[in-house]
Image: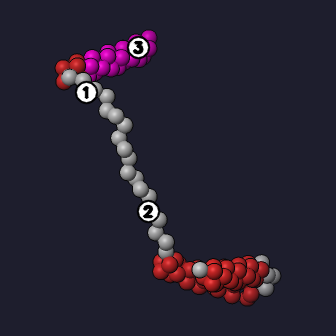
Amino acid sequence: MDADREKDLQKFLKNVDEISNLIQEMNSDDPVVQQKAVLETEKRLLLMEEDQEEDECRTTLNKTMISPPQTAMKSAEEINSEAFLASVEKDAKERAKRRRENKVLAD
């Protein structure tokens, strides 16, 4: 296990050095060096995408939810009467609003 960690660390440090060099080359005053660094960076990004697809670690999320205790179900009559009263109240508010708007427009 330690050999794997050491190998990963060395690979990471090598990548850091290479990326630092590419950034320095991109900041160069010489346009040829800049262009070369851009091309090398694009090539490196393509290789990284391919490596990620191969080495990709898939993390899954467990979305299992335990339902909260259900409240006692209301009877169908109570539900229907509550829904009816709510719709009547909503309709009355909409009509009152329209009446006010029409009155303002008429004046």
Question: What is the crowding at mark 1: few (fewer than 14 residues within 10 Å), some, or many (at least 20)?
Answer: few
Picture colour scheme:
secondary structure
Q: Give the residue displayed 31% in from the left and 32% down from the top.
A: 70
Q: How many marks?
A: 3
Task: Look at mark 2 in the image and give the residue it sits on.
Answer: 60
Q: Give the residue displayed 18% in from the left and 20% down from the top.
A: 77
State the separation of the CA atoms marked 3 and 2.
55 Å
State the separation of the CA atoms marked 2 and 1.
36 Å
**Residue at the outermost left position:** 77
User: What stretch of residues is rendered in magenta?
Assistant: 82-107
Task: Tell me residue 73's x, y (percent).
Answer: 25, 27
Question: What is the crowding at mark 2: few (fewer than 14 residues within 10 Å), some, or many (at least 20)?
Answer: few
> Mark 3 or mark 2, which has the lower sequence index?
2
Q: Which mark is residue 73?
A: 1
> Mark 1 or mark 3, which has the lower sequence index?
1
Task: Look at mark 3 in the image and give the residue it sits on.
Answer: 100
The main secondary structure of the magenta stretch is helix
Please state which amino acid type lies under the numbered disc 3: Arg
